[in-house]
Image (tube, helix red, strand yellow):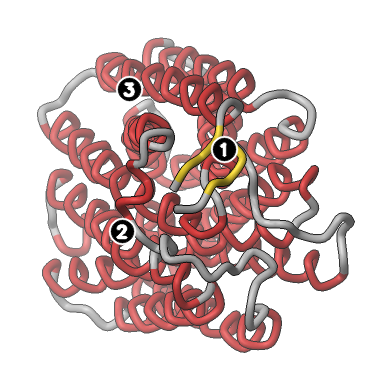
Amino acid sequence: MAVVAMGEVAAGPERWTLRAFAVVALCFAINMADGIDVTILSFIAPRLQSDWAIRADTMGTLFSAGLLGMAIGGMFVAPLADRLGRRPIILTALALMSLGMIASGFVTSVTQLFALRVLVGTGIGTVLAAMAALAAECAPPSQRNLAVGMVQAGYPFAAVFTGLLVAHLLPTHGWQVLLIGAGVITVILFPAAWLLLPEREAGAVADESAGRVSALFSSTLRSRTLFLWGAVFFGLMVLYFIVSWIPKLSIEAGLSETNGIHAGALYNLGAFIGTSAMSFLAVRVPLGRLVPVMLTGAALAMLVFGSITMSVGATLFVAFLIGVLLQGGYNGVWPLAASAYPAEVRATGIGWAIGIGRSGAIIGPLMGGYLMAAKAPLFLLFLAYCGPLLLCALCVLVVHRGARAGVKII
C-alpha cells in the first residue's frame, strides 16, 4: 500500500527545461494529429454520404466506430503506460493511427471503413491518456494545469486547418486522398517521438499498484473516479455530437455546404482559443469554478444556435462561441484528471476515464443521427444535449472538491 498526498503528482522540474518544453510541444503536435484524424470524418461526411448513398444513422455509426476504438485504447492499452513507460505506448499508438488512416483511403465499403476507424480510435485513445500523464510529469508543479491544458489545445488547433483544407481540396481531390494525407502527417511525427520522448519519465515509479484498475477504487479514490467518469461521459456525449455534426447542423440551419464546413472550422478555432484561455486561467482560477461556468455558457449558446434564425455571419459567430465555451470548458477535465491520481496510476485513471467516457461519445453522435433522421427540429436537438452538459459541470465540481482534500491511499 502506498500513501500519497491528495493532489500530489510526481516530482518534475522546478522550472521549465528545454527538454520538458520539447516534450510538451511534441505532445501538442501529436494531439494535433489526433484532431485531424478524428474531425476529418465530420468534414467529409456530407460528401461521403452522397458518394455512397448512406443515411444519417449509418454515418452516425461510422462516427461512433472511432470512439469505440478510443474506449478500447484508453481502457486496455493506455494502462500499460504505467507499467512499461509512456514512450513505448505512445510510439505504438502512433503506429496504429498511421496504419489505420492510410488504409482508410483505400476502403470500398462501410464495413471496411468502420473497422479502420476502430483501429485509428484505439491509437488515439491510448495516446490521449499517455500524453496527459507525460505532460503533467514533465512540467513544473505550478504549471501542470497549463501544460496538460495546452496539450489538449492541439486537437482543435489542427481541426481548424483540417476544415479549411477540406473545404478547399475536397471538391478537386476527393475524400480518399484526404484520409491518406492525414495518415502521412501522423507518420511524420513518429521519428520526432522516437527521438524526443524520454526513456524513463520523471514520474516513473516502481510500485506494485502501477497500472492496477483496482487502485482507482480505493476508499479515497472511488468517488473521485466515478464522478470523473461521469464528467467525461456527459461531456463527450455533447462534445462529439457537436464535433461530428456541426457542418451538417449548420447546413440544416440554412448555410451552404462550403459555409457548413467553415462553421465546423470556426467551431474548432473557438475550441482552440477556449482551451488555450482555460489553460492559462487554470493557473489562477480553480478548475472547479472555471469549467462549470464555461459549460453553462456553452449550453446557452447551443440553445441560441438551435432556436434563432440568424444571418450567415451570426450563425458562424455562434458556432465559434460554442467552440470557445464547450470544448474550452470540457478540456479542463484533463488537467483535473491528471491532478486527481498519483503517478503510478495516472495513465490508468485517465485511460479508464477516456474509455468509460467514450460510451457517452458513442451515444452522442449516434443519438444525434437518429434524431436528425427523424427530422427533429434543431431547437429540440440542442435542448436534448443541454441536460448532459450541466451534469458534466456538476461532476467536475465534485471531482475538484475531492482532489483538494485528504490523502490518497492506494
Label 1: how many Cα within 10 Å (few below 14, some 14–19, many 20+): many
Q: Amino acid at mark 3?
A: Pro
Q: Is residue 333 left or right of residue 230?
A: right
Please indicate whether residue 241 sits to the left or right of residue 398 in the image.
left
141 or 360, which lies in front?
Answer: 141
Label at residue 336: 1
Residue at screen point 21% across, 70% down? 113
Spatial CA span between label 1 and label 3: 19 Å
Q: Residues within 10 Å of mark 2 (few under 14, many from 20)?
A: many
Q: Using the image as rendered, state which of residue 398 and residue 160 is in the foreground.
A: 398
Q: Which mark is residue 406?
A: none
For badge 1, the amino acid type reads Leu
Q: Earlier in the sequence, mark 2 or mark 3?
A: 2
- Taking 114 as reference, is 272 above or below it? above
Going from the N terminus, do you reach mark 1 or mark 3 first? Answer: 1
Image coordinates for residue 170, horizontal then vertical, percent: 43, 65
Q: Which residue is mark 2?
A: 75
> Residue 84, position in %: x, y?
47, 78
Q: Are marks 1 and 3 in contact (CB under 8 Å)?
A: no
User: Residue at coordinates 33% horizontally, 42% vertically from top-left?
Assistant: 217
Residue 388: mark in rendering: 3
Q: Nearer the viewer, mark 1 or mark 3?
A: 1
